[in-house]
Image: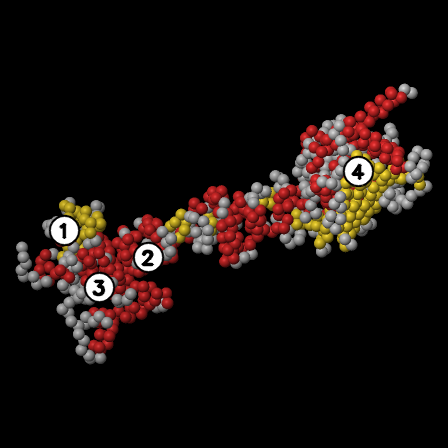
């Protein structure tokens, strides 16, 4: 052997080792944030692998203080190959062709991740030589160096220190229960301490899953002197209901960690649950790696499988932060895909068993979004076809949504607010839908978590959907019935809803699309069809209703307390009533009642009536008279001087009213004969007392109004402008509404009787072009023997005619004018001679 060549070979080997270590550590330092906790799993993996292919179980202890962290275990001793692998960074876990191994580790570089804690580690243990001898060892392994020149001597020193430590350290045997193997890392910097702390916290969080998946680990103890805590985890026997139970003892206090799990020996799935009362709450897997290859593949927290999956047979990526899932020809990729499909089948069975009220928070087992992983190693189309689509189809059919009553509903029958809504908005829209459909929404407590896991095909609660549901009720009454509330409480609920809806301006346009605003009759209308009631007068609304148009159909319900709407005022309803009254059927009971109510309203609102109704107000008496069929009976009632409104009320109370009135007429005739105005005056006469019946001034009576042809206030006021005429009447006497109504009735009656009489004289009078609108007491358009004439007519039931109308006087000034009267018995023409003789006129001015 040429020594120089052999020395060169050794130097080449050391350089190769140093180069690999330098490159690997450089890569790890570039990804240190994602590898903070990996050191603990690499060390635990070594401990587990030390008892592989044996029936032993290993116990582990981690001690952490401010200066160092030490990892110890009682697994099997090292082999010569293990020592070479540690120092020369050559995998000690490679197997010969055809050999089957239960060791998890597959990369000799994995141990280098522990150097993120510290570049210098002290390793203690026992090594067995090929000859079967056992030696204790204790040596430092220093990887602090950026160049081969620096690192090669440290590799050589590790070998030197190893050999020195084995001198005089041979032992015959050792106690397998002792922690004979340890790795101790110095922590001089704050960053190193933080890496150690992160690893310890992650270890405590995930060790229950590892203990569930790996039967070779008996217990794990973490002594954290920086926080004065001691946590110990130990596997308990499986429970009768299938849970894997891990006992956690923290500072002497024991608690139980339960895990749902299922396995087919090749694949195991698990999820953590917490028992609360008589139920189990499924805990979130949000920050848990979803893939384990016995140990967590840190970096698969966003793989988004609905449950944690473990398989020793997974083929991890080099950094153990995922698995290969790209391609359809590589054996390792195909194996990984098949393992995921097996996991999905196990999951379906497990979820089916959990889909009952015993389990809560099943949304934590319903995650189905695509994994967030490196697209270079992930075949999205395969995952969608083989995992995501069948997973979502399965989830939809499962009764996994808990309702407020504790019962479960299927996901496909459940409704959830949009994820884009704020949390406050989601809760409010949930509340309204819960009140309407309690069996269609999840528990309020579960609302936000469910929204995070559902996808676009799930039924979504939107403002539009909510308003559609309200509109389908059609009436506030139906809404009240469905809510199971009183009308008052229903409107409180409804106003809360309306206030909520209008809080977002984007919703305002929907009020024109969905009929959800109740009118006074309780029917829902769209916004454009409804008005605020500024009329504030139930009588006018009733009048229009009786005329065939119910404005309660368009006026917003008085209990609605939100929104801005168009307005209806008194002037609007006055216009509509006036339109309706231009052409009415005076025989219709509702119309008669409407005119009666309106007439009374006019009496109580004279100025307002004159302003709002104008034309209708001026012809109010005519309207009222036209509703009366039996004007003769009305005449008798009117002559009784009884107030019509009192008569109307009395008629309802006393069906014998007209018979009683007939009896009273004799009394009234007697009073008229003696020119008595009151019953008291009549009583005084009957008692023989003197009664002052002064006749110097005339009281206003209906007979005088008839004689003058006056039918309304305006005509009376016009007549009183004649001072001579005014002087005839007692100023204390004022015409009443009833007098006007009676006068109007008499004039209408006289007009009709005169016209009918003239028709009997058809040989003399032609009425084809008759015009009755020139003036109340004038008939125009009449032809006599072919010549046009005009006729002034008057009722003369009191045997008097008073001519004061300018139109009448002007008409009578023409020679082709005739004066006709109806005295209640016959119709006859009054000649000039009759007037002179009857009134004893002997002279008159020319």
Q: Distance between the residues labelled 4 and 3?
A: 123 Å
Can you identify the residue that label 4 sits on? 121
Question: Where residue 266 sits in the image (x, y, percent)?
Answer: 81, 38
Label 3: state its secondary structure.
Answer: loop
Q: Which of marks 1 and 2 is nearer the N terminus?
A: 2
- Seen from the viewer's position, the closer of residues 704 and 752 is 704
- Residue at 85% in and 35% down: 161
Q: Which of marks 4 and 3 is in front?
A: 4
**Residue under label 2:** 598
Which one is nearer the viewer's eye here, 456 or 123?
A: 123
In what element is the residue under mark 2?
Answer: helix
Q: Report the disc number at residue 811.
A: 1
Whichever of labels 4 and 3 marks the residue nearer the N terminus, that label is: 4
Q: Which of marks 1 and 2 is in front?
A: 2
Of pointers 3 and 2, the one earlier in the residue sequence: 2
Q: Which one is closest to the eye, mark 1 or mark 4?
A: 4
Q: Is residue 739 left or right of residue 189?
A: left
Of callouts 4 and 2, the N-terminal one: 4
Of residues 678 and 255, the one nearer the viewer is 255
Question: Looking at the image, is mark 4 or mark 2 nearer the viewer?
Answer: 4
Q: Position of residue 569 (x, y in %)?
A: 36, 51
Q: How far apart are marks 3 and 2 (CA)?
A: 22 Å
Real-space Cα distance between discs 1 and 3? 29 Å
Q: Name the residue under label 3.
A: 734
Spatial separation of the CA atoms under disc 1 and disc 4: 135 Å
Quadrant of the snapshot with the C terminus: bottom left
Q: Are there few (<14), some (14-19), or many (20+) residues within 10 Å of tag 1?
A: many
Q: Is residue 97 above or below residue 127?
A: above
First in sequence: mark 1 vs mark 3: 3
Percent across and percent down for residue 429 are 56, 48
């Amino acid at each position: 052997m040429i020594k120089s060549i052999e020395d060169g070979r050794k130097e080449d080997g050391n350089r190769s080792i140093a180069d690999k270590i330098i490159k690997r550590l450089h890569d790890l330092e570039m990804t240190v944030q994602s590898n903070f906790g990996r050191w603990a799993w690499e060390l635990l993996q070594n401990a587990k692998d030390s008892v592989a292919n044996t029936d032993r179980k290993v116990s582990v202890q981690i001690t952490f203080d401010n200066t160092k962290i030490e990892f110890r275990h009682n697994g099997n001793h090292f082999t010569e190959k293990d020592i070479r692998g540690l120092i020369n960074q050559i995998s000690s876990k490679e197997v010969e062709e055809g050999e089957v191994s239960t060791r998890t580790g597959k990369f000799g570089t994995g141990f280098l991740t522990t150097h993120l804690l510290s570049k210098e580690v002290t390793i203690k243990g026992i090594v067995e030589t090929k000859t079967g001898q056992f030696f204790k060892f204790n040596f430092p392994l220093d990887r602090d160096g950026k160049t081969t020149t620096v690192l090669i001597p440290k590799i050589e020193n590790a070998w030197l220190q190893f050999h020195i430590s084995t001198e005089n350290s041979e032992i015959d045997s050792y106690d397998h229960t002792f922690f004979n193997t340890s790795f101790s890392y110095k922590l001089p910097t704050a960053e190193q301490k933080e890496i150690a702390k992160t690893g310890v916290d992650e270890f405590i969080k995930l060790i229950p899953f590892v203990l569930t998946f790996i039967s070779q680990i008996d217990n794990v103890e973490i002594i954290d002197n920086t926080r004065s805590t001691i946590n110990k985890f130990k596997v308990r026997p499986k429970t009768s209901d299938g849970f894997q139970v891990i006992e956690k003892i923290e500072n002497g206090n024991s608690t139980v960690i339960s895990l749902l799990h299922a396995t087919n020996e090749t694949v195991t799935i698990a999820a953590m649950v917490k028992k609360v009362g008589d139920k189990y709450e499924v805990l979130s897997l949000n920050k848990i790696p979803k893939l384990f290859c016995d140990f967590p593949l840190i970096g698969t927290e966003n793989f988004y499988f609905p449950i944690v999956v473990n398989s020793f047979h997974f083929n991890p990526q080099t950094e153990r932060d995922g698995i290969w899932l790209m391609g359809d020809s590589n054996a390792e990729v195909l194996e990984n895909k098949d393992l995921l499909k097996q996991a999905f089948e196990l999951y379906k069975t497990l979820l089916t068993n959990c889909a009952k009220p015993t389990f809560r928070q099943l949304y934590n087992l319903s995650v189905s979004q695509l994994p967030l992983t490196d697209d270079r190693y992930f075949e999205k189309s395969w995952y969608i076809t083989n995992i995501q689509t069948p997973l979502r189809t399965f989830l939809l059919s499962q009764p996994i949504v808990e309702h407020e009553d504790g019962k479960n509903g299927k996901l496909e029958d459940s409704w959830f607010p949009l994820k884009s809504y704020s949390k406050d908005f989601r809760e409010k829209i949930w509340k309204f839908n819960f009140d309407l459909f309690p069996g269609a929404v999840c528990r309020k407590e579960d609302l936000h978590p469910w929204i995070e896991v559902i996808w676009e095909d799930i039924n979504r609660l939107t403002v539009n959907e909510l308003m559609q549901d309200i509109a389908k009720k059609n009436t506030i009454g139906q809404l009240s019935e469905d809510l199971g509330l009183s009308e008052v409480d229903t409107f409180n609920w409804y106003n809360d809803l309306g206030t909520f809806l209008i809080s977002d301006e984007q919703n305002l346009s929907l009020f024109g699309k969905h009929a959800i605003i109740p009118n006074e009759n309780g029917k829902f209308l769209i916004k454009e069809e409804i008005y605020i009631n500024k009329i504030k007068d139930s009588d006018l609304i009733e009048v229009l209703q009786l005329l065939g148009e119910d404005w309660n159909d368009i006026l917003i319900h008085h209990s609605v307390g939100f929104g801005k709407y168009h307005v209806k005022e008194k002037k609007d309803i006055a216009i509509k009533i006036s339109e309706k009254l231009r052409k009415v059927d005076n025989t219709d009971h509702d119309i008669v009642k409407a005119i009666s109510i309106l007439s009374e309203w006019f009496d109580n609102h004279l100025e307002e009536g004159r302003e709002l109704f104008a034309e209708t107000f001026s012809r109010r008496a005519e309207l009222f008279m036209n509703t009366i069929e039996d004007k003769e009976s009305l005449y008798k009632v009117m002559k009784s001087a009884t107030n019509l409104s009192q008569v109307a009320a009395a008629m309802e109370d006393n069906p014998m009213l007209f018979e009683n009135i007939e009896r009273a007429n004799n009394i009234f005739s007697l009073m008229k004969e003696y020119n008595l105005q009151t019953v008291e005056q009549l009583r005084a006469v009957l008692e023989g007392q003197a009664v002052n019946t002064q006749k110097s001034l005339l009281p206003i009576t209906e007979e005088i109004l008839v004689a003058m042809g006056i039918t309304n206030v305006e005509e009376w006021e016009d007549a009183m402008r004649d001072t001579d005429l005014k002087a005839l009447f007692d100023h204390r006497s004022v015409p009443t509404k009833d007098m006007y109504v009676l006068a109007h009735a008499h004039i209408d009656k006289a007009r009709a009787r005169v016209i009918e009489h003239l028709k009997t004289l058809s040989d003399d009078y032609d009425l084809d072009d008759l015009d009755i609108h020139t003036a109340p007491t004038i008939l125009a358009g009449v032809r006599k023997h072919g010549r046009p004439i005009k006729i002034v007519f008057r009722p003369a039931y009191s045997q008097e005619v008073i001519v004061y109308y300018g139109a009448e006087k002007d008409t009578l000034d023409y020679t082709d004018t005739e004066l006709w009267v109806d005295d209640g018995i016959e119709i006859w023409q009054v000649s000039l001679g009759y007037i002179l003789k009857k009134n004893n006129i002997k002279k008159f001015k020319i």
